[in-house]
Image (cartoon, rainbow, N blue to C red):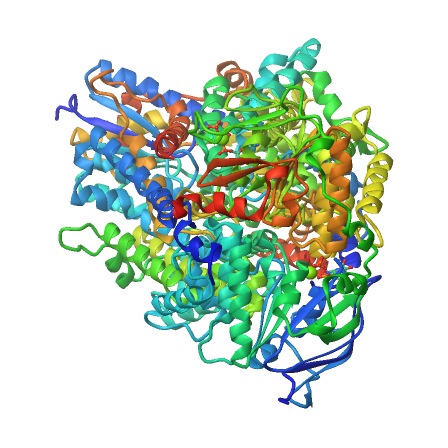
Amino acid sequence: ADTSGKRIALSNNYAGNSWRQAMLQSWAQAAKTAISEHQLAAADTFTTPDKEVTTQAAQVQNLILQGYDAIAIDAASPDALNGAVKAACDAHIVVVSFDGIVTAPCAYRIVVDYKKMGEEQVNYLATRFPKGGNLLEIRGLAGTSIDNVIHEGIVAGVAAHPQFKIVGSVEGDWDEATAQKAVASVLSSLPPVVGVVDQGGDGYGAAQAFAAAGRPEPVIIMGNRQDELAWWKQQHDKNGYTTWSATIAPGISSLALWVTQQVLDGKTVPHDLTVPYLQITQADLDQALKTAPVGGVANITYTQQDAIKAIEANSKK
Amino acid sequence: MSGPAALAAEVRSPRPPRQFNARRLFRTALPALSLIIVLLAIRDFNPRAISYFGFNLMLNLAVPVALATVAQLCIITVSDLDLSIGNYVGFIACVTTTWLPTRPWLGAAVILGSIVVYGALGALVQLRQLPSIVVTLGMSFVWLGLALLIRPQPGGTAPSWLAGFMGVHVPFVPFPIVAAVVLAIVMHIVLMKTAFGAVLRGAGGNPAAVARSGWSLLRVKTTAYAMAGVLGSLSGLALVGVSSSAEANMADGYTLLSIAGAILGGAEFVGGRISPVGAVIGALTLQLAAVALNFFQLPELLPGFRIPPEWQVGAQGLILILILAVRALINRGEA
Amino acid sequence: MDREIIQLNAVTKSFGAVQALRGVDLSIQPGQALGLVGHNGAGKSTLMHVLTGTIAPTTGSIASGGGARPDYGVAIAKRLGIRCVFQELSLCPNLTVAENTRIMHPRLRGFGWRRRAGRLITRQLDTMFPDHGIRSDTVISDLSIGRRQMVEIARAFTTTDDPLRLVILDEPTSSLDPSTSRQLLAFTRRFVADGGATILISHLLHEILDYCDRIVVMRDGRVVADEGTAAFDRAKLIVTMGGAAEGHAAEAPVSAATVAAEGPARVRYRPKGETGGTELTAQAGEIIGLAGLAGHGQSDCLVEVFDAAGGRPGRVSVQGPVALVAGDRQTDGIFPLWSIADNITVRSLGSLTQGPLISPQRADALAESWKQRIGIRTPDIHNNILSLSGGNQQKALFARALGSDAEIILMDDPMRGVDIGTKLDVYGLIREEAARGRTFLWYTTEMDELEHCHRIYIFRNGRIVAALPRAELTEERVIHSSFQEAVA
Amino acid sequence: MSGQLAALSRLRTRPWIWSFLGAALVWALAVILAGGHGAWSVITTAIAFSAFTVLVGLGQMFVITLGPGNIDLSLPANIGLASAVAMKVMDGSDGRIALGLLAAVAAGLVIGIVNYLLIRLLRIPPLIATLSSSFVIRSVGISYGRGLQIKPPLAFADLVVARLGGISVLAVLVLLLSILAGVVLARTVYGRSVLAVGQNIRAARLAGLSVRRVRFLTYALCGALGGLCGALLAGFTGGSSLDVGAEYLLTSIAVVVIGGTSVAGGMANVPGLWGAALMLFMIATLLNSSGLGIGVRDLMTGLIIIAVITLAGGRRSLR
Ligand SMILES: Nc1ncnc2c1ncn2[C@@H]1O[C@H](COP(=O)(O)OP(=O)(O)OP(=O)(O)O)[C@@H](O)[C@H]1O
Ligand SMILES: Nc1ncnc2c1ncn2[C@@H]1O[C@H](COP(=O)(O)OP(=O)(O)OP(=O)(O)O)[C@@H](O)[C@H]1O
Ligand SMILES: [Mg+2]
Ligand SMILES: [Mg+2]
């Protein structure tokens, strides 16, 4: 079907960190391509002033009133937006959620396998420390689903490798400063730890806290922020420090845009699409650092072709 | 009596009291004025929004906010401040989605118990003469912790009767407007019109005087806090009714929003000067100001102009400032 | 004779180091108008708080109707029909007149309570102050201090179902103008004639002498005299109160001739919206009286002059630093969290600095010297200001202004609640300071005080309607000008 | 007249003792829980982190002391923007550290002044004025910093985390600053004016104090301290971040009120800021290392705060 007249909106609830900035940039880039190729008429972004789920729900309701054909959402909550999402579906608006997904059955979800991401962290550490050891866990924002799923993955990983033991757990709220403070607050009471498992984006803060306390750096699982990667490289050059990074690429927004376009196009698209998470190994480190702007994040931007491939891959299952 | 005293009858009162009332009336009308300004702006940007369907969508989330705002107002009435209302609403939402559908008795008992706790807080604040801000700050952690214990992950379902109630279709007038009007009237009657409301406000204005007249300040504060507990619980229920599921920190922002709404509506932090109608209007205004932003475009001036994403947050602030500036201008012209 | 309404036996009360009451016996019978006088800080208000149950005595006992009341408190006092108009305002400023009435009467509830409360208070106001001009739906904070006082007094006399036997009036007339005071006092006579009892506290001795049957004099926490009015006259009262001031009493007020009314005007003032008409001017060394009925623009004049200081000359021009002595001390004057010393020195902070810092020694010295000069009764100037009696708080405000570098002192009916002895001292002080070149603008509701002024401006409806030199000042002329329009 | 005035006025200046006692108690519990490990390092860590809390708390305290309704909600946005400004101006070069600090303080100062102008010109309650301005500041921050995390110059980062004998140098500097603030409050005309305005704004005006100037200076001061804190935090956390101030919205208010400053205005308490900041950090330490779930931890945090304030008792009315 012809989608050149369709308008889609991006509902976003936060813009203040590098990940979200990169996410918005990827969206804008894809939107520009789509509009210039007459695949879409408009792809506007809307950002709420606070991170509140209720504000975003109100925003989605307003977007319905604006008469968009589709809404892409990076949701503040998987369930609490369902009321608004359902209203959108009822108004025959296509809803595609990504990163922060919504559970309403009528919506599409582009997810990263967070549980696997958590498990793989422990798996990686098991290759580094076959004898196991103590782990510190940095969690995300309490009470959110992403935090829960990653945590479950980590717990499953530890269950599979019982030589590891989680001796401390703090809330980093996915924010470096918060993570640094939280880690610092427990460090003095912790026995030696060999690894830090986390949710991405708080590795550098943890490293800072360990350095400030004068403790040896454990293997900290990194995110994809440039400062994390730069620190990693610096340590590697200095003493051969090696670790692993797993996160969701902010460019997933561009994938969401193209998937939305495909849905509007009338293609059959499964409601749940799983895409791989972005991982960086020691071998990829230099390449990743090159693409990440200073202070930004390592990223990839997807194309329409990528979207079609992802849809095919998920349809086969 | 003769002479001066007798003459005084005619010449006293250089300022007839009525003049004061006119100013006061104007001040009370200010919140409504802001609301009208916002509505006009919205109509200009998106005429489609000013409809039955549009109001339902724009305002159904304003109902829980308005309830939280009047809950806050009960506390402000006695010259205190509640920093825990947002977390309390989130807690109630978690209780509602976790227990009300399956074990309604347990859920109801927990909600009632929480209201009792709220009342007890008022008693504690009065008995020990504690700053309410610190106590409620502590309580905000308590409610959040309890909510996380009940519902470590988001989810749950709204009891069907609740979702049904919040989605009810009133003929002609959208439900949120009906709800807001009813709320404003009820609160106005309770706080401003009843004999009991006068004592509450009096305790905010001059507690010593109220105590000297033989009232128990303990009872007054307990009542005010318990009322806030009731309204906060209703807010939690309404929120679940709209969003149909819950998470622990879903209403964190209500704390600030409720204070801002009450103040925007003409309440003062101390001294028991409040306006329930103004508070409800203030809550609606704040909600609609956000709407106005989403609709903001200048089709005639700059075709296709949209606020770039990084300025959308700031535009929200500017809109608020703009509303208040217009208010200040009108106020100055009048005064 | 009836049984007593209430009786105090050997009541004492101490606040930390301060002995406010040192063994007071007092018994009050129905049908009696009792006058209570004493210097500032004598313990009058404290005694009244004991009577109404808001303060429990340290030692001593309270009895009523022949029986002892060991657990005496607000509730019992209420049941006994004892009401009090406290010295400091006891209304809720955010409530309306009717709502404040309801606060006092638990009975006023249910449907239509507001109308009933409004009618109750309006009827009482009509009876007591026929010309009050107060609507029952007015919010208290919108009323002038005088009208607030009227509401509070009237409220004390309203009844629903509880008894009303004794009304205590703690300096009720301090914020009322003379004619309203007369209306109040006349009403209390009627109330007493009907079998009620009143206790009237006032520093205006003529009120006590004219309206009371029995006078109790307190000094330093003790009752030093308790006799029928006939046993006293003004002079004897002053002596009994501890009348060191007796000597000054006869001293003649200023004569106009002592000041050379020359030189440039320090203050020029024309009321808002007036172009012609009388202009108020004041020179160095002059004491200028502002007269007229309460609320006719005198306070506005003072505030405008205050605000104009340091600004460009216009309708109001002021040359030199100003300081203001507030009359409404609760809202305009005191800083309730601060000590007496802090309250006195706040106007002079700029001149008490050494380098960037305020010198505590110099601040204390200033406060201490004014405590002595003006006789503030306190063991320690570092005590909280609220530990002072009402009159002594007022003295602290005087000290604040007089102790500053101000050339122009604005006084907003500042003698409210100041005892007679101190008043005479302060009059002397004002004369002395004027002689040194200070200018005083003095709004007063007391005729006697105008005698201390070189020139008097009479205000009516926000306009200046007359300017009288001291020599032409007579009570008739003031009254005539204050009421001119009505007479015409 | 509730009696015992003298004793009371002494008690009113004392509530800060309770926050220190609370901090000590929680610290003891944490040390016991850790089996006696790290007793000293918990203290030094707490001091290092409290420096930032106190720095922001000082500004907020001055504002809150101005009287009911006065509050600065723009601090988090201010801190975030200032961190970006500082890092951008420093540009990773040791020679530009002073310049960067100055720029951050200037940014904060401008924010404070704008806040005051909004309050004054639009005659709106400070709460709403600073809330609105915080939105705008956040946007300025995003478009200025693009959410990028810019690294501090090495010398600056070292300076901010430097310790002498285990004690954070920065904390010592902030301690000196708090002593200065205490002196300003008690002994300068400006400080006294803040206290006077907070008690009775009308009486303050009629006592010849320049109310407007005092309010202006106070909001400007608060903004400037926020800016300074933003720059220092960027050094401490190893890079600018718009979110770095987020936690200071609640924390700045919490340390002020827990520390014994009167929310009704007119009475400030500087030592209490330190007590409260230390106590809050100790609570986090205790609960984070307790191994309890987050729900229980939050619950305990709240209960501890309430317990301490209840034990401390409040102020009693005077008459
Ligand atoms: N709450 C208090 N704390 C400490 N001292 C107090 C307190 N209340 C009153 N006092 C002291 O008790 C004494 C009596 O005060 P009281 O108010 O009874 O005097 P008063 O006779 O009413 O004086 P005035 O004519 O000035 O009103 C004074 O020395 C006063 O300073
Ligand atoms: N001369 C003054 N000095 C210090 N503070 C003042 C002064 N005048 C007013 N204020 C205080 O400033 C605040 C605003 O005062 P107000 O509403 O009177 O503004 P305004 O000065 O009259 O405005 P405008 O500039 O329009 O005349 C009030 O809190 C008031 O107490
Ligand atoms: Mg007295
Ligand atoms: Mg003005």
Please tell me in which quarter of the rendered image ligand 3 is found: bottom right
Give the quadrant of residue C17.
bottom right
Q: How many marks?
A: 0
Image quadrant for the C terminus of chain B?
top left
Rendered location of residue A274, percent (x, y): 35, 36
> Which of D216 and D273 lies nearest the eye of the viewer?
D216
D45 over C207 or under it: above or below: above
C370 over A277 or under it: above or below: below
Q: Is residue C472 left or right of residue C256?
A: left
> Which of C354 and A119 lies nearest the eye of the viewer?
C354
Rendered location of residue B242, percent (x, y): 30, 52
Tell which residue pokes out farthest to the top in this image: D95
Q: Is residue D206 left or right of residue D26?
A: left
Rendered location of residue D215, percent (x, y): 59, 31
Q: Is residue A97 left or right of residue A231?
A: left
Q: Is residue B151 visible?
A: no
Rendered location of residue D296, percent (x, y): 58, 57
Q: Is residue D109 visible?
A: yes
Give the quadrant of residue D7.
bottom right
Give the quadrant of residue A76.
top left
